[in-house]
Image (cartoon, grey):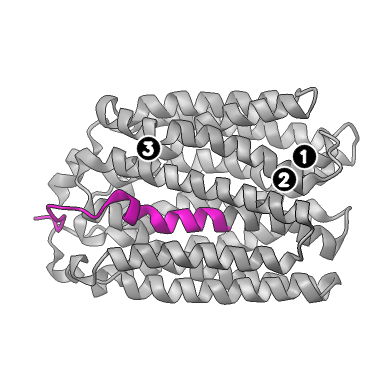
Amino acid sequence: MTTIPPRPPQPWVLSAFWFGTAFHWLVLLLILMPANVEMFVGEARKGTYLGALVAIGAVMALVLPPLVGAHSDRSGRRLPYMRLGVAVNLVGLAIMGFAAMTLTGMNGFWVYVLGFLFVQFGNNYATAPYSALIPQLVPPEQRGRYSGVMALLQASGQLLGAVAAFAVGILKLPVIVSFVLIAVVLLLPALITMRGIPEATHPRPLETAGGKTLSIRELFAHQAFLWVFLTRVLFSLGQYSVQPFLQYYNRDVLRQTDAPTSTSIMLACIIVGSIVSALIGGRISDRVGRKPVIYVAGAAMAAAALLLLVAPNYPVALALALFFGLGFGAFTSVDWALGSDAMPSASSYARDMGIWHVAFVAPQMSSAPQGALLDWGNARGDNFGYTLVFGIAALFFIAGVLLVRKVPDNAHEGQQAAA
């Protein structure tokens, strides 16, 4: 028997934490870190060191969620993990802001890395139990709507992040202002979610929750989970082949003199497109299934990645960014629903969602070789590095579209049976 309550919390309350997290990662990963890393290590090594930093964080994001999720399942609690994770995340932001504001050179870079490790630890410590809430609390027939709201709030958080970064850049405010903004916008929505999910709604401890707890091998033998996991890996590989280097693309390829501000505008275009398609895509997926939405989304993202290579100017690139956003929003609108449908047992939602989350964070490790490939290709002239990494991104998106066909259409029915 499942532990899903008859009245799940409002989707806006459940998804509020994702709004703050989206703001957090957009400003940090796409605006602050590229600029800060270049300040610490210099122009010639920016891609290599940025990619390495993202990959270092990904190692922690790879290991931590399944472990924390399993412990959360055994204790039958979610909120204590979220509280501690958010607190550690805030400490990490403080360390990164201190390094960016007061230190220089490689010594400053390593302090910055330390802060980033705290950020990754805290964020993943909170995300692991949080990820279990949709499959735990929301009936399968409503997950598309809830996933769509989560995608909409994610896109809205990213849009606010892009606007905030643009404003900070235009006003020439100190870098510490951005870190304070990240901390505030992370904390307030997290409090909304944590206050809106009473501890009493959380699952009983693992031994009394009901349903068989599968081993890791048995989990991946479950066909729905296996193919959803692999599909998400491919889409994430496409995203992280390009995303960390957008600021460098704006300066090197599009010849924008104020690359951080230009990147903020480009990100805003991506996010506006995401908002348009996010809520619609989730509702459509409840009617026609998850896979048709992903087919369209993946094709759009692959086409946009390739066309950005031949964009003749910045306005055309912005139009392509908007088109990419339409695909990305449609994908994220069904992403959580597809993952939730694939969970085979109610006894280990947090652990299994933590493992599923690995499919999103592990591809961040590809940023290290992609950054090195970017520098290697650009050293050969004509911005060849961007041709390589954008082309690889398109191939990943196409492969994800092809592979999602293997996901069973009745994944949530298998989950119900297992529970």
Task: Determine the secondary structure under disc 1.
Answer: helix
State the residue position of label 1.
249
> Is 273 left, or right, of 265 in this rendering?
left
What residue is at 91 percent from the left and 35 percent from the top? Answer: 381
What residue is at 77 percent from the left and 51 percent from the top? Answer: 170
> Is 38 left, or right, of 233 in this rendering?
right
Tell me if mark 3 has few (under 14), some (14-19) or many (20+) residues whose alpha carbon lies within 10 angstroms of its own.
Answer: many
Q: Amino acid at mark 1?
A: Tyr
Vertical position of residue 403 compared to residue 357: above or below: above
Task: Determine the secondary structure under disc 3.
Answer: helix
> Is 1 left, or right, of 250 in this rendering?
left
Magenta segment, which residues?
Answer: 1-24
Number of the label disc, if any, that sits on residue 334: 3
What residue is at 51 percent from the left and 38 percent from the top? Answer: 235
Vertical position of residue 307 compared to residue 220: above or below: above
Snapshot quadrant of residue 69:
bottom left
Magenta run includes residue 151: no
Magenta run includes residue 4: yes
State the residue position of label 2.
245
Labels 1 & 2 near each other (Cβ < 8 A):
yes
Mark earlier in primary sequence (3, 2): 2
